[in-house]
Image (tube, helix red, strand yellow):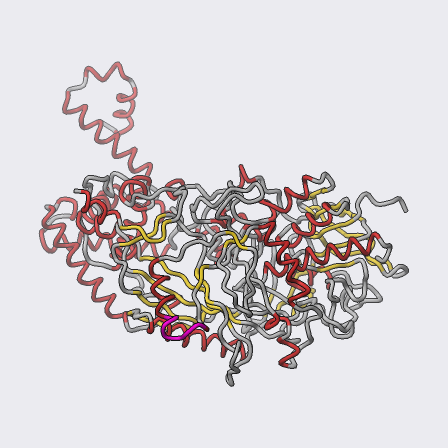
Amino acid sequence: MRRREVLKLLVTGSVLPTLSPPLLAACREIHEAITESKSLKALSVHQHATLIAMAELILPRTDTPGAKDTNVNLFIDRILADWCTIAERDRFLTGLADVDRRAQSLFQKNFVDSSVAQQTEILRGLGEELAEAVAAVASGARGNRGSTPEPQDNFYLQFRKLTLTGYFTSEPGFTQQLGQEIVPGRFDSCAPVRSAVQTKGS
Amino acid sequence: MAPSKYDAIVIGSGITGGWAAKELTEKGLRTLVLEAGRPIVPEKDYVEHVPSWEMPYRGMKDRRKLEKEQPIQSLCYACEEVNSNFFVKDTEHPYTTAPDKPFWWIRGRQVGGRSILWGRQSYRWSDLDFAANLRDGIAVDWPIRYADLAPWYDYVEQFIGVSGEAMGLAQLPDGKFLPPMELTCAEKTVKEAVAKSFGPERVLTIGRVAVLTQDHNGRAPCHYCGPCHRGCISLSYFSSVNATLPAAEKTRRLTLRPFSTVHSLIFDSKTRRITGVRVIDTNTREALEFNAPLIFLCASTLESARILLNSATPEFPNGLANSSGEVGHNLMDHIKAGGARGIVPGHEKMRTIGNRPNIAYMPRFRNVKDQRHDFIRGYGMQAYSFQDDWRRGAMEVDFGADFKRRISDPGPWNFIFEGYGECLPRYDNFVEIDKNTVDAWGIPSLRIHCAFGENELALRKDASISATEMLSASGAREIQPFRDSDPPGFSIHEMGTARMGRDPKTSVLNSWNQSHDIKNLFITDGACMTSSGCANPSLTYMALTARACDYAVNQLKRGEL
């Protein structure tokens, strides 16, 4: 069945009961994939899935929402499409492809199809390389106002930055995870951190 | 000629134009305020409470648009994703410099001008500043002293509301303060350590800031949301829109005309007075003319100079009110970007609640009692303390649930000392009309020639050294001295270009901010400054404006203008 026909069937509700359950599920999957690829601006469906899996490992759902719950992936897609330079976007997508290359060479499958333990191993590898890159520039020229220098063009660093930004600037990230308010209404110059308060309370 | 509808015209509605509007209307003058930009309606235009998740780029700004339209404006920290329309489009407002002499000109054209965006730091100058040129034999002497301005500082502070701590220092006179904001725990640590090592000459105090800490003249105290430069719906910080323009409005003698780009002033050679103002309607491009017997030029240091230079006549071939040849010259800013950063130990389990819209401040301590051999004048230190936040997690290797929890707590306390140094007035730092460049309204633009001199660079260097010493004395670790190369203009404290002075041959304005050449012309924005001091200048502009208005109205009533 061609895609267009499937869609036609889906919108024509009367046809639905005549479809067998497996066929119906297949239709839904195709429908979701089409909707997803339409809403994505820079990423393919596969790149998107890889990004979601990676971001959720960095900031998983705990007692608060995680990266996927807060659509960090869609934020990154927007940044890649409308904010980055073409060179920056290409570098990012190359980095993403490299994640699959690593998974293939270690486990003979793509990152999204790897087990959590295998995915964790791949991120650790990326992290070790990032740490080396950070160390390599540490003694170099400082940034603005003496800030810590950052390695340039490092995919994993850019990925982590965008993941953290997307999460902590989301409503759940800001209000639930950080416990902040837009209008605090007061200034307390020296209050205990939240975890210290929570530990004391429990 | 029919009698004019207005008794006075104020050009500009920024921090000084707003004050001129308030003072002139309250003293009975029907006043027209010409503002080049759009009107500002707080309920509609203020955006301080827009949460990050409602911003498409989550605070990372519409980078492509800004790089295209506002490449210079977006360098300013206050030019953010949601408020970049409080800054001009660089594409509409070109200016030129020599390639090796960059000048970053940050501008806001709307009702309220840059008073919506300013840093709100409000310091009195002292005779250490007003007598400096005379003492050093540099440029010309200020025609006033602290005693002339002190009652006007009182007057302005009582209206705008300045929170701060009285310290009894001669070089930074106390004002009429509202209760001070609190120092953070890291600031208290540094304050104590510096006092112990360096004695009473180096004092860290909370910034004196035009942000209310209690109800004041019908305006509410700060609610500590943080980004004042996006506006303030509770009117808690001072701006023209929040305070002076509403006061002028109340008199029913104010006519505020937004979208009125001033082209030039009209000079009548017979009466030797300015008779009117040539305006281009910002939207329709229609040429208009407005008349009044009294003109207050408050368009900002560089725009006021530009208007004078674009108003040349046969009598004043080098620019109006420029018989001295000093219009456009002696351009100053403050030199910043010399300082140090470090991590202050302790208080790891502490954090701040609320966003204090204020810094800590160390008043000038160089060349106050002793005389240095490597430079004259001095600098004040702005001090910032802030904890690392979740952003620190990007450069780490960890991930997962524990990582998420850990980086959600604030991290170590960073501390930055950064000097703001005095710039000397020099004739060869100047602006002129660039005949080959016009703005979007066809008005010739400026070519800016400005560079820091040896004395300024020595101040930047010394600020870095003394900042390092003080962080070291505070037990800070990972101390990083810095001397960044921020060009002139970027402290956004432009001054000079129509200086006050005693002698009409060497200065543009007299001791009342009145043109030596043209009696009904007053200039009270930063253009009037004879030297640059090292403390933030806006409070002084406001005091000078109120004082000049008082004088001008008295003169007008006596028929002397």
Residue B160 position, x and y percent, is 58, 50
Q: Of B350 and B292, which appears nearest the observer?
A: B350
Task: Indicate the quadrant where residue A132 lies.
Answer: bottom left
The residue at the point 29 percent across, 44 percent down is A72
Residue B302 position, x and y percent, is 64, 62
Q: In this rendering, does residue B172 appear at all?
A: yes
Q: Of B311 and B411, which appears nearest the observer?
A: B411
Q: Of B38 and A126, which appears nearest the observer?
A: B38
| Residue A8 vertical placement versus B368 (above, below) | above
Image quadrant holding the C terminus of chain B, namely bottom right
Residue B312 position, x and y percent, is 78, 63
Q: Is residue B336 magenta?
A: no
Give left or right: position of B412 versus B267: left
Q: In this rendering, does residue B70 appear at all?
A: no
Give left or right: position of B351 versus B262: left
Give left or right: position of A46 versus B332: left
Q: How many marks?
A: 0
Give left or right: position of B98 versus B167: right
| Residue B386 vertical placement versus A170 (above, below) | below
| Residue B204 vertical placement versus A49 (above, below) | below
Q: Is residue B196 magenta?
A: yes
Q: Residue furthest bottom?
A: B373
Secondary structure predominantly adopted by residues drawn in magenta: helix
- From which residue to which does the magenta span run? B194-200
| Residue A98 vertical placement versus B375 (above, below) | above
